[in-house]
Image (cartoon, rainbow, N blue to C red):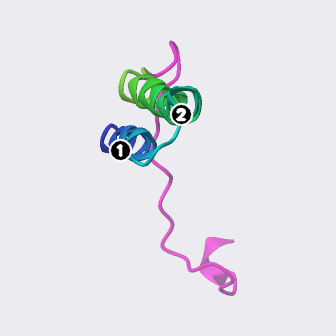
Amino acid sequence: MLIDAIVPFGDAFAVLTHGGSLTTALGVHVSAASLVLLTAVMLLTERPAAGSVERPAASSSRRVGAAPDPSDA
């Protein structure tokens, strides 16, 4: 995610070097890069909610859609 933030900075550089306006480069591309960086920071610093416990899924030896086993009754 952090690597993806480099792309809009490269786009802003391309806009500036090919005659584009500084306003466009900053307004569109640098703001997009900032949004990607903010999202990356939020994802990388996310913590589990207090009181939430991850439990492993119960495993079953029966296949989905299999006929019921008469010995289970």
Residue beneath the point at 47% across and 38% down: 55
Q: Residue furthest front?
A: 19
Magenta segment range? 48-73
Residue 44: x and y in percent read 36, 28
In the foreground, 25 or 44: 25
Q: Is residue 67 above or below residue 23?
A: below
Lateral position of residue 71 relative to residue 22, left or right: right
Q: Which disc, if any, is residue 61?
A: none
User: How packed is label 1: few (under 14 Cα within 10 Å), some, or many (20 or more)?
Assistant: some
Task: Measuring from the top left, give residue 26's x and y in whole percent.
Answer: 51, 27
The amino acid pointed to by label 1 is: Gly
* Residue displayed at 50% across by 28% down: 22
Residue at point 52%, 22% (across, down): 52
Number of callouts: 2
Q: Is residue 48 above or below residue 4?
A: above
Residue 19 picture location, percent across and down: 47, 44
Residue drawn where x is 52% and y is 28% of the image: 35
**Element at badge 1?**
helix
Residue topped by disc 1: 10
What's the residue type where badge 2 is placed? Ser
Q: Nearer the viewer, residue 31 or 18?
A: 18
The majority secondary structure of the magenta stretch comes to loop
- The residue sitting at the top extreme is 50
Element marked by disc 2? loop
Task: List the single residue furthest toward the bottom.
Answer: 67
Between the C-alphas of marks 1 and 2, the distance is: 15 Å
53 inside magenta stretch: yes
Q: Quadrant of residue 40?
A: top left
As for residue 47 lying within the magenta part, the answer is no
Q: Earlier in the sequence, mark 1 or mark 2?
A: 1
> Which residue is identified by label 2?
21
